[in-house]
Amino acid sequence: MKITGSTRIFTIIAHPSTHVVAPSIFNCMFESMDLDMAYIAHDIPPGAVRATLEAYRSWSNLGGFNVTVPHKESVCALLDRLVPPASDIGAVNTVVRSSEGDLTGYNTDGRGAIRAIGDVRGARCLIIGAGGVARAIADALLKAGAGHISLLSRTPQKAASLMELFPAGKVGPFRAETLQHTDVVIHATPVADHIPLNLDMGCLNKKTRILETVMRDTVLSREALRHGLVLIPGYRMLYHQVSENFRLLTGIEAPDEVIVRAFRESGYPMP
């Protein structure tokens, strides 16, 4: 990849940033499409987010940026405009910078999750976590016709705040006795080295779909496979988001074959 003084730059803000895979995927796509663009990761601690976004406003060749853990909710108050569903749920994952330096926030997490999971009409769902990803996916599940969502979170205050966003009776706290009747489980925390909150995967029925939003290998993913459950790995959700993210950031539609090739070159076993 050749970077020049006129190269259009895109970033992702995270903390830490060592786990992010978007730079590899986007740079493969830029190269395949012969675009003078580059994508880099910025490790931004929470206390530096405001200063970073102020710098981004004056960075004239910055086209926009993606947002991941732990910044998806906190950046909302620092943007000029939020587009639904970001404005409804208070979380963003994509920000577009205008030529004047205005920042507009979007959220594609929910749509990516639904495309990865498939039909959820009437489904009894469990979301592990209550942060920005959980908010986006809960919103998308209900819009897609899910029957009920249970929340399992180590921070009850965040879970309560999430529940308040939705109609009464549609989202509620997790109860262990309902686990065996769960149709879809979404892991929406960054935890990789243990099963969050000691969830008993053995209680789930074999048709339960498990969506893992973490991109790397996790204990929860391995346990899902060990118990014969239907695992949807994190890269499948990201795959269904990349086309929209790419269009929002660059203004260009990426051919599907370019996206698939970028995932393969980044180490993901695409069909």
Image: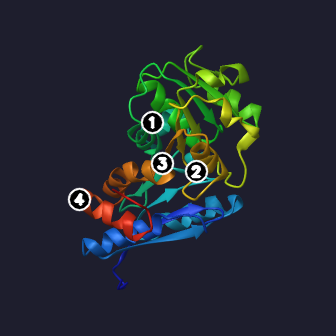
- Mark 1 or 3, nearer chain start: 3
Residue at the disc numbered 4: 255
Going from N to C along the chain, the mark reached first, 4 or 1, is 1
Label 3: element kind: loop
Amino acid type, callout 4: Pro
User: Which one is earlier in the sequence, the residue at label 4 or at label 2?
Assistant: 2
Asked whether the viewer can see residue 18, the reply is: yes
Mark 2, residues whose alpha carbon is within 10 Å: few (<14), some, or many (≥20)? many
Q: Is residue 131 above or below residue 47?
A: above
- Of helix, strand and loop, which one carries label 1? loop
Nearest the camera: 155 or 234?
234
Residue at image mark 1: 85
- Per the image, the residue denoted by label 3 is 80
Amino acid type of the residue tagged 3 in the rendering: Asp
Residue at the (34%, 58%) spot, across then down: 246
**Secondary structure at numbered mark 2:** helix
Residue at the (61%, 53%) spot, across then down: 71
- Quick one: SS at disc 4? loop
Residue type, mark 2 in image: Val
Could you tell me how far apart the alpha carbons at marks 4 and 1 are, in whole angstroms?
A: 25 Å
Mark in the foreground, 3 or 2? 2
Mark 4–mark 2 distance (CA, rounded to whole Å)? 30 Å
The quadrant of the picture occupied by the N terminus is: bottom left
Q: Which dot, 1 or 3, sits closer to the camera? A: 1
From the viewer's side, name the closer residue of 100 and 224: 224
Q: Is residue 57 above or below residue 151?
A: below
Mark positioned earlier in the residue sequence (3 or 2) = 2
Q: Which residue is mark 2?
A: 75
Frontmost of labels 3 and 4 is 4
Q: Position of residue 143 (x, y in %)?
A: 42, 26
Q: Are marks 3 and 4 in contact (CB under 8 Å)?
A: no
| CA separation in Å, label 3 and label 4 | 31 Å
